[in-house]
Amino acid sequence: MRKLILFACSIAAAAVLGGSAGAAAPDVGVLSVEDGRGMVMLDLNGSVLGRLSTGTLRVTDHTPRDRYSALVVGRKLTQERLGPKTVLYRGQGLRFRMVGGGYRIVVRGSGISVSAVGRGVVSLDGEPRLSGEDVGVYSLEDGVDCDVERTLCTPLPDEPQRFTLGSPSGDGSRVQK
């Protein structure tokens, strides 16, 4: 199921970013996060699908006048408008979708699973409650789904780390900052 979601996300991003419908543009990056505890921040143009067991989701729509809008559902869902382009969601069992457009998304909590395709910046910060606790895994490699191939993924970092998703130059490389 997650492979299908990742594939659909790739096609949507390719269409939004000017690629062909059959494959993602070579300068588009892919992120997969599974069972995360802590913080995942994405500032990108592209598409994001995710879920959050419990915590907060802050969404800033950089392109509020385009045809795309954020979709967030969940139990005990509350939303608070923080500005003309920013909404803070709280709740349990949150599921979210941002397809197309430009967004800054900050996910904090536990049970974080995210699939993203696009160009931008990603910050990851695992927050264990106890020393040595599993804080989830991530991958920035094309085609690696951490839900299916967890052994090919990297544990979330204990300290905040920032990565570039995709390549603005079009060479397809992913650079860690």
Image (cartoon, helix red, strand yellow):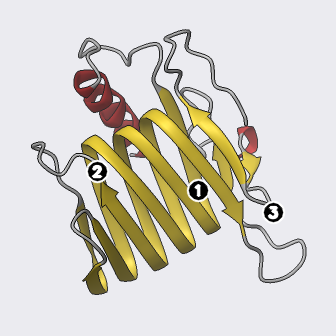
Q: Find numbered disc 1 in the image and state the secondary structure of the residue it sits on.
A: strand
Q: Which tag, 2 or 1, sits closer to the chain's start?
A: 1
Q: Which residue is mark 3?
A: 158
Observer-nearest of 159 and 138:
159
Which amino acid does the dot numbered 2 rest on?
Met
Residue name at image x 48 percent, y 63 percent: 106
- Residue identified by numbered label 2: 98
N-terminal of the pair, mark 3 or mark 2, is 2
**Circle 2 — which element?**
strand
CA neighbours of label 2 inside 10 A, class few (<14), some (14 to 19), many (20+): many
Sequence-wise first label, 1 or 3: 1
Q: Quadrant of the C terminus?
A: top right
Q: Which residue is mark 1?
A: 34
Q: Quadrant of residue 60?
A: bottom left
For residue 136, say whether it is visible.
no
Q: How many marks?
A: 3
| Mark identifier at residue 155 | none
The residue located at (49%, 11%) in the rendering is: 170
The one nearer the camera, 128 or 163, is 163
Could you give the CA–CA distance between mark 1 and mark 3, rounded to whole angstroms? 16 Å
Q: Is residue 7 visible?
A: yes
Q: Is residue 96 above or below residue 21?
A: below
> Farthest bottom residue?
76
Q: CA distance from mark 3 to mark 2?
A: 27 Å
Q: Foreground: 131 or 57? A: 57
Q: Residue furthest right?
A: 131
Camera-near label (1 vs 3) is: 3
* Left or right: where 27 falls relative to 139: left
Q: Name the amino acid, label 1.
A: Glu
Label 3: which secondary element: loop
Query: Are there few (<14), some (14-19), or many (20+) residues within 10 Å of tag 3?
Result: few
Query: Circle 1: is it few (<14), some (14-19), or many (20+) Cα within 10 Å?
Result: many
